[in-house]
Every structure is written in structure tokens, then in C-alpha cells.
Image (cartoon, rainbow, N blue to C red):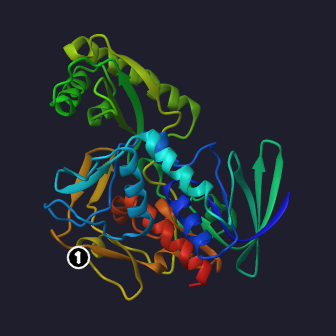
Amino acid sequence: MELSCDILVVGGGIAGIAAALKAAREGADTILIEKNNFAGGIAIHAMHRYICGLYPSDLQAPINTLNGGIAEEICLELEKLAPGSKAIQMGKVYVYPFATKDLLKVLKNLSDKQAGLKIFYETKIDSITTEQGSIKTAFAKQLKGELIISPRAVIDCSGEGAVIRFSGAAHELLPENERQLAGFCFKIKGITNPPDILSVSVPYYLFHAVVEKKLPLYMRYTKFYPGDIDDEGICLINLPFGNNPEKTREAKKQAVKAHKILADSLVSFKDSYINEMSSVIVEREGLRMTGQYMLTKEDVLSARKFHDGAIKNAWPIELWNQDKGPTYQYIEAGDYYEIPLRCLKSINIKNLYGAGRCISVSHEALGSTRVMGTCISLGEQAGLAAVKGL
């Protein structure tokens, strides 16, 4: 099938949906391709429980989101499905809780009813041709054949930077042993009378299992979050990234071991069972596009503002170091920094934009920009910029 469009968005995660919605709302003929059969990407794969990066860095409960727009719209739609939901404090910041099924429903409803937007699920970008420094054609594989798409502009929201790689766009990629730890989740059901301290006691018992060499070293960074209902919870394993079936099988094996330790150690887990596991290991850091500007650690921590500042963010620099575990560096309370539009524009491919994890930022700055709330706004601004040719 041969198609042409104004804007091609690759990747239907949280950033990609926002980019496609904004482009279509601005009157552009928009195509979105997504390799899964659902929208939401990592937010769904990794069983995320909270939208981070929505609010100012203030210890008082937030009234509005920093960026408004589609991020705020998604929160309002989630609230309709779960009346009474509101931002909750987590450490020094606020996050918005959600149920996976609700996020799936909201994203589907928003995208299905959007005029000017055509979505192809179970479709994966396969190759790109360029001409005189611009993307000319994108080739995508489907179960039943191939799409040949001629776009005016392309937004890479794939997370893995697929378009960036195929187009020959300049980028950076750290060796695997220097990247942030990746994530793998498993859901436990059948938890009886769960006490409020499970978020502390679960990591405590797993840490001691690591000390006793019953679990691998990386399991000492495991976190626990309450589930959508009282009898369930989600364990987040943080481990070195490996994008292959063997690493995923190993993660599943360790999840089973961890659950048995919890069932033997905690009365609440005695009759529990693993209900669901992530299908893949989800990386926090991968390929980063080289843009017309690279956001740095200093820009974030100094709350720097830019003449072309397009997105506001106040999330700390949250790095999951492979040797030290998680570290957090906060900007001053009540302030925020800006992400310039130049971070969303390729330095050498004229009609290529990025949003989500693969924008032009340093390794440290990525620890702040990669969270869901910020990625929604990155997608929205990339969609607008691509339509306007900014």
C-alpha cells in the first residue's frame, strides 16, 4: 500500500499519541504506526502506576499541570473514569495515579475519534530513504504486507530511535554497561489484608535475600507499588538492559524466586500468586538524537529558561545507576526548567523531529525528561512544530 501524508508519527506510546493528536488537530493529514496492537507503549508494557513530570516542584498539592494541553486533557479523562483521583505526593514531588485499563481506554477514545488521523497497529518501521538531507520515504512492515509512506515530516516517538537510526540522523548511544538500569514488572494477586508498609517491607525482604545470595545483586533495587485493587501489587525489578528472549526469561525466573521469598516471609503474601508479567524488559535509556541543541544536567538543575522553550519540567534528575541504584537531584522548590524546541529537531535531517526518550539531551538530563508527563508534552510540541515547519 502506497500512502502520502503531511506528518508520519512512528511509535504509538504516550509521546506518539500526543504528537499524532496535535498534528491532526492542527489540520495535518497524519499517519501513526505502532508495532504493538495497542497504544501506550512502555506505560502499558511496564505496568506504570503514576504519571510523573506533570507538576511544579512544590511541596504543596498542585492545582494545574505545568504545560496544560494534552497532558492535562488525559488527566481529566482519567479522572472521569476514576472519580476522586488526584495528584499524590511521592517524596519531594507529586504524581498522578492511574489504572492501566483506564489509560488504554483514554488513549483509544482520543485517537479513534480524531479526524485526520489514521493509525496502523502491528506495523513496524523497516527502512527509510533520504534525499538531500530530508526523509523521502518510509517503509513499514505489517502482518499482511508493506506500507510505503511519503511524508512531509516525520516524528520519531519509537523510544528506540528507529527512524533516527534508519535515516542516518546524528545520535549518541552509550555502551550497555553505562546506561541506566532497565525495568521489568510482575503483578501479584491474592494479597490479604495488605498493610500500608508493603512498599518498605517488600524491598527489605528482597534486599536480605540478595545479601544471602538467594537472588542476584540487581534485585536489591526492586520496588513495590499497590495495584488497582486491594489484593494486588506490582513489583518493579531494576536490572541491566538486555533486548533478547534469554534476558527476559531470566527476569521471569527471578520474579518467581522473589515471589516465593515474599510468600514465605510475609503473611499477607502467603496465598498470593503471580498474575501477570511484563512481556519484555523495558529500557530507561537508549539512543538519543543529536539535535540543534543538547539539554544538559546544568540546564536542568539551574532551572534554565530558553528563548525557544517549548516544554516546562520540574522532575528531578532520576538516574538508575547499574552500580549505585537510584539517585535523585532536585531543582529548587517552586521552579522549573524549559526544554527548547531545538532539542526536538535533528541537526542533520531537515524534516525529522523527535519526542519521548530519544530527544537531544545528555545522559544526566535524560533522567529528568524521560518521564510520562513530560513525554506527553514533548509529543504535543513536536506535533505542532512538524505541522508549522518550525
Query: Is 36 placed left or right of 53 in the picture?
Result: right
> In the displayed structure, does residue 110 sit left or right of residue 116?
left
The C terminus lies in quadrant: bottom right
Name the residue rendered at 48%, 80% in the picture. Answer: 342
Residue at 25% x, 53% y is 87
Residue 113: x percent and y percent? 61, 58
Q: Is residue 117 above or below residue 196?
A: below
Where is mark 1, residue-wise? 302
**Badge 1 amino acid:** Ser
Picture coordinates of residue 375, whole percent (x, y): 44, 61
SS of the residue under disc 1: loop
From this viewpoint, which residue is outermost toward the bottom? 307
Depicted 38 relative to depicted 285: above or below = above
x and y percent of residue 318 in the render?
A: 29, 55
Q: Is residue 209 left or right of residue 130?
A: left
- Image quadrant occupied by the N terminus: bottom right
Is residue 350 placed above or below 316 in the rendered structure?
A: below
Question: Residue 155's x, y, as percent?
Answer: 60, 68
Q: Residues within 10 Å of mark 1 (few under 14, many from 20)?
A: some
